[in-house]
Image: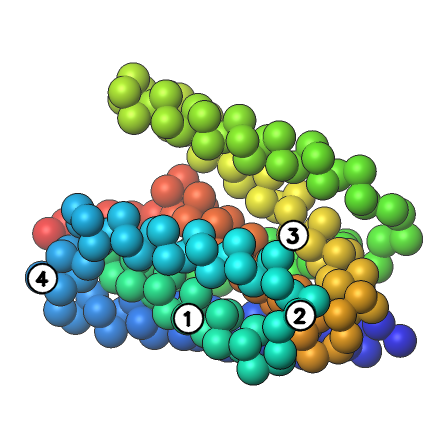
Amino acid sequence: MIQEKYPKVFTWLFIGLIITFLTGYSLSLYPYAALRLNSGGTYIILAIIEIAIAIFFSTRLHKMSKLTAIICYIIYSFLTGITFGVIFLAFKLSSIMSIFLITSIVFLAFAVIGMTTKKDLSKMSMWLLMSLLAILVAGIVNIFVKSSMLDLIITIISTIVFIAYIIYDMKNAEYIIREVGEDKGAIYGAFQLYLDFINLFINLLKLLGKANDN
């Protein structure tokens, strides 16, 4: 049964999150390095590499080996961890831990819905994609407008969208495993859920997190 494959998905998800948060925390111990890696051209290069890995992962999944899938996932998790170095500098550690716990509870609650629902959620794909594009456009606009109210609205809507993505991607993991096999399917399913978790965490941190005094 497909449900028996979910432990592998969650195991890989946990591995990715551990890599990201340990990398972020470790880098935050060296503030100068964390700030340098997350500014200017270096940050842009890291972002481009992450996008390239995500595109390669999704478009070449059928043809790549299990080892290649693992490498893509681990490198992506590590690069995301580098960007998290700034988060550990900007927010109190206690706040980050609290938001991580809240994110985990919310994630698990909606992941269960995704695992147990019998409905066909394929129609959600286009709606979710359009929502992401709208959020992206609004975010670009707000770079110039610099509206705190618009930023709050974007964050709230983004939170809702990624909660919906958790349900969709959890259900979609079934189809991925059937299509490419248990090993690669579990890794890629975990990758999609990893993106949902990270984005939900960031949005909740923006809404509820407490900034460092220094």
N-term-proximal mark, 4 vs 1: 4
Report the amino acid beneath label 2.
Lys
Give the quarter of the figure containing the N terminus.
bottom right
Q: Are marks 4 and 1 in contact (CB under 8 Å)?
A: no
- Circle 3: is it few (<14), some (14-19), or many (20+) Cα within 10 Å? many
* Residue located farthest toward the top when viewing the structure as drawn: 145
For the residue pair 29 and 144, the one nearer the viewer reads as: 144
Q: Which residue is mark 4?
A: 32
Report the amino acid beneath label 3.
Ile
For the residue pair 126 and 32, the one nearer the viewer reads as: 126
N-term-proximal mark, 2 vs 3: 2
N-term-proximal mark, 1 vs 2: 2
Q: Which residue is mark 2?
A: 63
Q: Which residue is mark 1?
A: 75
Instruction: Find residue 212 and name its label.
Output: none
N-term-proximal mark, 1 vs 3: 1
Q: SS at mark 3? A: helix
Residue at position x 21%, y 54% in the image: 42
Left or right for 21, reference 114:
left
Q: Which residue is mark 3?
A: 166
Q: In the rendered image of this protein, does residue 210 appear above or below residue 25? A: above
Report the amino acid beneath label 4.
Tyr
Q: Nearer the viewer, mark 4 or mark 1?
A: 1
Q: Is residue 63 visible?
A: yes
Q: Label 4 to label 1, Cα distance in Å?
A: 22 Å
Quadrant in which residue 59 is drawn: bottom right
Q: Are marks 1 and 2 in contact (CB under 8 Å)?
A: no
